[in-house]
């Protein structure tokens, strides 16, 4: 068991100085191609692709086949340049720095035709001393090298042995050797995304001028005294003292609501200096802790830190202070070999419910505050409490983590290494250490981040020998793995942040992997750590297919995004399932066929002779299949939290792959590009509900488990109903007596042999009936109705074509859809095209004649616009 106690402070503001000046270089720059044939304005932050698009020199890069048509952009060596004037007397400042918060990626930086430094890592800050070079009027250039050509060059230079993989599978239409460049790994393509290896200044850039002393960074580490039951805080501040004499200072730390104020006297010697302060939090004041969504409030406290130095120099920082503890529990489980793997927050075991986050766009300048809030609000709206920031993307911008803090979303934070082996030469390792140091210091103040993870799937890639390494060479790669993730990344993390658990990989066997020398012979062992699981061929309605693991951090099925999303980047000739466009957009080998194979196990495939109608019906059916498959698998993991069966179980996490899309294409996502909810996301709102009845069969016996993520017990009644497919009236209904549903448990509530259930209800067969069930108390619903199909729907008897009508009305900013159906309707799908917003429910089984659904628009819209765009589909419409 590893205990990590955490007081967290989210930094706010850039601080105030009396003896410093700052000049932002954001805004318009010039962008020039390698041979000078193209020169145009380009915004910073931004990238070359965006600059070309904004000047109408290229189409939308996502349109049709433009990921291939615009490959030339990434293969060129572009230059960013800008002339700027310093609006203050530069001669009066002892030190002047040029600071880049993010450069993408390989560039030489020149100021006034003098080379002042180079960059080769997208994930770190660069600061260059330009004191002797800067003038009143200046000319800055960043001469970029093609990331594709640089990666190939670095790979060729690594002559001692191969570092696989060389290239992605051909179906991904990607670029090669991405593991040789410290850049967003999926920018060279992935099985759900295009290859757009961007170039540009992707974050802020500024000039900093100062005298005497400058605060470079300041960060926080918590210490908790178990014996005294009090919080302490270690504040680390880094100064650049340019004075030739020592500088005296007074530091005042204040947290008013906690009645905490402490003053310190320090002396700073010339040069780079680090100051550590130890703050005791007033133990006489009750501290409210930060809780994940669904478990409590996200309480924070305002703090100010004032540095008062000689000659009236002042630095003032404001911060949000959060308190919470996190523990990763790996300990023996009674009745099972192996170890547990779950997280405690503030001493309370929490089942992690959620998904995996990928970059929201190939072009980060498109990812604004509005989009981030929309996507993250959709996370909590679907009853999730966790996102895993996946290791093939980027360390997200500050606002992402601030929103997660605010919304109560726990973050499993990967370092940016994925599905590859990596070089370990000195330059590469130096770059990685700088990257990890910078990112941990930047991010550790956020209560939302609960664990660091060294990489995505690289332990599995090596030990399952994905790249067919000759066994005689395996020792070299194992040594490199330990060197990178253990002796370097882990070492830096533990030095910078002792307040969170660190795991070397995902999936991993955790403590067992460590015991086996950091690499386990079977990283997918269900009795340790976390697992990733994918199976597109076996029947996903059969829960026996799924591993009863300790923690499922990746699993999922593909579907296509809605037609309204695809329509924006395609033309009429593309609108069929077997079109060149549909094949091009699918980056997963045999993905389109696998979706139809899985759908065909339980549903009739679309039969329309109209190509457009058949395409839309197929899109709908892939979403039905995906939603039902992930529902079945997630419910299996949730009901496995409290039991051990054949040594397996005690599952305490379910994070499906994946939350969001990077472009408009088939993928595992539940949110389409731009944020529209797929059917899966509506299903997630139900299968991640805090109180959930789960139904399943085992050897022809029907079971219902009750799953609770609540913090307290509750008295409930379970109601089980059976309908025939041809009638909206229940054939029979049975309610249990009141019973106590224990907090934080999954327990058996009901069981009945299916033949007995069918006889009891009379005139019922597996093919002609469907079961639904819900939890209530005193006639008040505590859970939404869940359902269990007794047979495949392609074998359903009595299922009639449902005629569904809707009357739309408006209540302030919300729209009301009063639905009426002529027959039972499975998977009712309400769609309003491109009108942004979400419904209160969708994709549901409609077993009652009428139902009211609400629509919550994300932007102002009108009733007439909704009426014009509204369409309703159910499963019977495609037969």
Image: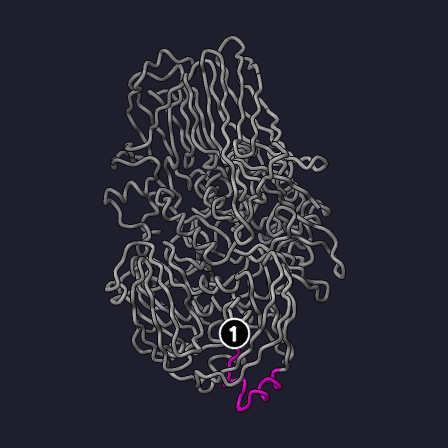
Coloured how?
one colour
Question: Is residue 770 highlighted in magenta?
Answer: yes
Instruction: Residue 837: give x, y in percent of width and height.
Output: 35, 58
Q: Is residue 477 visible?
A: yes
Picture layout, residue 366 above or below residue 311:
below
Secondary element type, mark 1: strand
| Depth check, front residue: 260 or 457 | 260
- Asked whether residue 297 is drawn in magenta, I would say no
Query: Which residue is rendered at x = 67% and y = 62% of the image?
Result: 642
Does 411 sit left or right of 515 as displayed? left
Residue at the image position 35 percent from the left and 45 percent from the top: 366
Q: Is residue 428 visible?
A: no
Is residue 764 positioned above or below 869 on the image?
A: below
Residues shaded magenta? 754-775
Picture coordinates of residue 71, whole percent (x, y): 35, 47
Badge 1, how many Cα within 10 Å: few under 14, some, many 20+?
Answer: many
Tell me the quarter of the image containing the C terminus.
Answer: bottom left
User: Which residue, given by chain and number where applicable, does mark 1 sit on?
Assistant: 787
Outermost residue, top side: 245
Which residue shows up at 45% across the image and 58% down it? 669
Q: Nearer the viewer, residue 218 or 291?
A: 291
- The spot of residue 846 in percent (x, y) is 43, 75
Please say if 867 is above or below 207: below
Q: Is residue 838 above or below residue 787?
A: above
667 left or right, relative to 494 = left
Q: In the image, is 542 to the left or to the right of 46?
A: right
Query: Could you say which is closer to the camera, residue 43 or residue 876?
Result: 876
Q: Residue at x 52, y 43 (%)?
A: 299
> In the image shown, does 664 or 851 lie closer to the viewer?
851
Quarter of the figure with residue 695:
bottom right
């Amino acid at each position: 068991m590893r205990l990590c106690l955490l007081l967290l402070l989210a930094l706010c503001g850039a601080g105030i100085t009396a003896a410093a000046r700052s000049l932002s270089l954001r805004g318009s720059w010039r962008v020039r191609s390698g041979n000078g044939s193209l020169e145009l304005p380009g915004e910073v932050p931004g990238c070359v692709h965006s600059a070309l698009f904004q000047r109408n020199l290229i189409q939308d890069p996502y349109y049709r086949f433009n990921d291939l048509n615009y490959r030339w952009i990434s293969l060129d060596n572009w230059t960013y340049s800008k002339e700027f004037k310093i609006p203050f007397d530069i001669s009066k400042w002892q030190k002047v720095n040029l600071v880049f918060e993010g450069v993408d990626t390989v560039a030489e930086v020149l100021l006034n035709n003098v080379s002042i430094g180079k960059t080769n890592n997208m994930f770190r800050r660069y600061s260059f001393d330009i004191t002797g070079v800067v003038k009143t009027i200046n000319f800055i250039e960043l001469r970029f090298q093609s990331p594709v050509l640089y990666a190939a060059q670095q790979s060729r230079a690594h002559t001692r042995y191969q570092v696989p993989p060389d290239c992605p599978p051909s179906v991904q239409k990607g670029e090669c050797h991405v593991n040789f460049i410290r850049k967003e790994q999926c920018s060279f393509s992935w099985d759900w995304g295009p290859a757009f290896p961007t170039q540009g200044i992707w974050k802020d850039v500024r000039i900093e001028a100062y005298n005497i002393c400058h605060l470079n960074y300041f960060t926080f580490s918590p210490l908790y005294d178990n014996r005294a039951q009090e919080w302490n805080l270690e504040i680390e501040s880094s100064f650049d003292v340019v004075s030739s004499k020592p500088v005296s200072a007074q530091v005042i730390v204040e947290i008013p609501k906690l009645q905490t104020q402490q003053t310190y006297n320090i002396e700073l010697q010339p040069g780079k200096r680090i100051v550590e302060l130890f703050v005791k939090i007033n133990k006489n004041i009750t501290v409210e802790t930060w809780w994940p969504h669904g478990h409590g409030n996200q309480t924070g406290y305002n703090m100010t830190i004032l540095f008062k130095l000689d000659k009236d120099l002042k630095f003032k920082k404001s911060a949000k202070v959060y308190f919470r503890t996190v523990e990763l529990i790996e300990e023996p489980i009674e009745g099972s070999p192996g170890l547990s793997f779950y997280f405690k927050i503030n001493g309370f075991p929490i089942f992690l419910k959620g998904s995996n986050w990928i970059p929201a766009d190939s072009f980060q300048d498109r990812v604004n505050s509005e989009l981030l809030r929309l996507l993250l609000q959709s996370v909590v709206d679907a009853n999730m409490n966790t996102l895993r920031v996946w290791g093939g993307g980027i360390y997200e911008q500050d606002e992402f983590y601030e929103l997660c803090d605010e919304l109560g979303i726990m973050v499993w934070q990967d370092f940016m290494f994925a599905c590859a082996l990596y070089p370990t030469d000195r330059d590469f390792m130096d770059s990685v250490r700088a990257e990890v140091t910078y990112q941990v210091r930047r991010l550790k103040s956020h209560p939302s981040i609960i664990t660091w993870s060294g990489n995505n799937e690289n332990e599995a890639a090596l030990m399952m020998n994905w790249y067919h390494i000759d066994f005689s060479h395996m020792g070299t790669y194992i040594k490199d793995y330990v060197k990178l993730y253990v002796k370097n990344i882990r070492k830096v993390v533990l030095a910078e942040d002792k307040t969170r658990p660190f795991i070397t990989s995902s999936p991993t066997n955790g403590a067992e992997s460590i015991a086996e020398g950091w690499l386990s012979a079977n990283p997918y062992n269900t009795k340790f750590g976390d697992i990733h699981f994918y199976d597109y061929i076996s029947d996903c309605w059969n829960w026996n297919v799924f591993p009863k693991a300790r923690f499922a951090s990746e699993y999922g099925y593909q579907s296509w995004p809605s037609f309204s999303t695809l329509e924006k980047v395609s033309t009429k000739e593309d609108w069929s399932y077997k079109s060149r466009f549909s094949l091009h957009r699918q980056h997963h080998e045999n993905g389109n066929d696998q979706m139809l194979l899985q759908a065909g196990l339980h549903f009739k495939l679309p039969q329309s002779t109209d190509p457009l109608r058949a395409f839309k019906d197929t899109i709908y059916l892939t979403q039905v299949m995906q939603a039902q498959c992930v529902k079945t698998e997630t419910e299996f993991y949730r009901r496995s939290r409290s039991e051990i069966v054949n040594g397996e179980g005690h599952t305490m996490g379910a994070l499906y792959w994946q939350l969001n899309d990077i472009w408009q294409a088939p993928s595992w996502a539940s949110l389409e590009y731009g944020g529209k909810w797929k059917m899966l996301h509506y299903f997630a709102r139900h299968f991640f509900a805090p109180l959930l009845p789960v139904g399943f069969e085992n050897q022809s016996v029907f079971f219902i488990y009750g799953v609770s993520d609540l913090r307290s017990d509750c008295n409930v009644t379970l109601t089980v109903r059976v309908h025939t497919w041809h009638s909206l009236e229940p054939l029979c209904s049975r309610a249990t007596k009141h019973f106590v549903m224990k907090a934080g448990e999954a327990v058996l509530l009901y069981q009945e042999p299916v033949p007995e259930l069918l006889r009891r209800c009379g005139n019922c067969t597996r093919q002609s009936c469907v079961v639904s069930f819900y939890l209530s108390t005193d006639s008040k619903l505590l859970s939404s109705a869940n359902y269990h199909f007794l047979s495949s729907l392609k074998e359903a008897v009595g299922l009639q074509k449902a005629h569904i009508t809707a009357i739309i009305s408006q209540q302030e900013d919300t729209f009301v859809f009063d639905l009426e159906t002529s027959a039972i309707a499975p998977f009712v799908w309400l769609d309003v095209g491109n009108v942004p917003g979400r419904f209160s429910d969708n994709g549901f089984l409609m077993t009652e004649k009428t139902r009211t659904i609400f629509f919550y628009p994300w932007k102002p819209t009108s009733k007439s616009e909704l009426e014009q765009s509204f369409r309703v589909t159910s499963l019977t419409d495609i037969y």
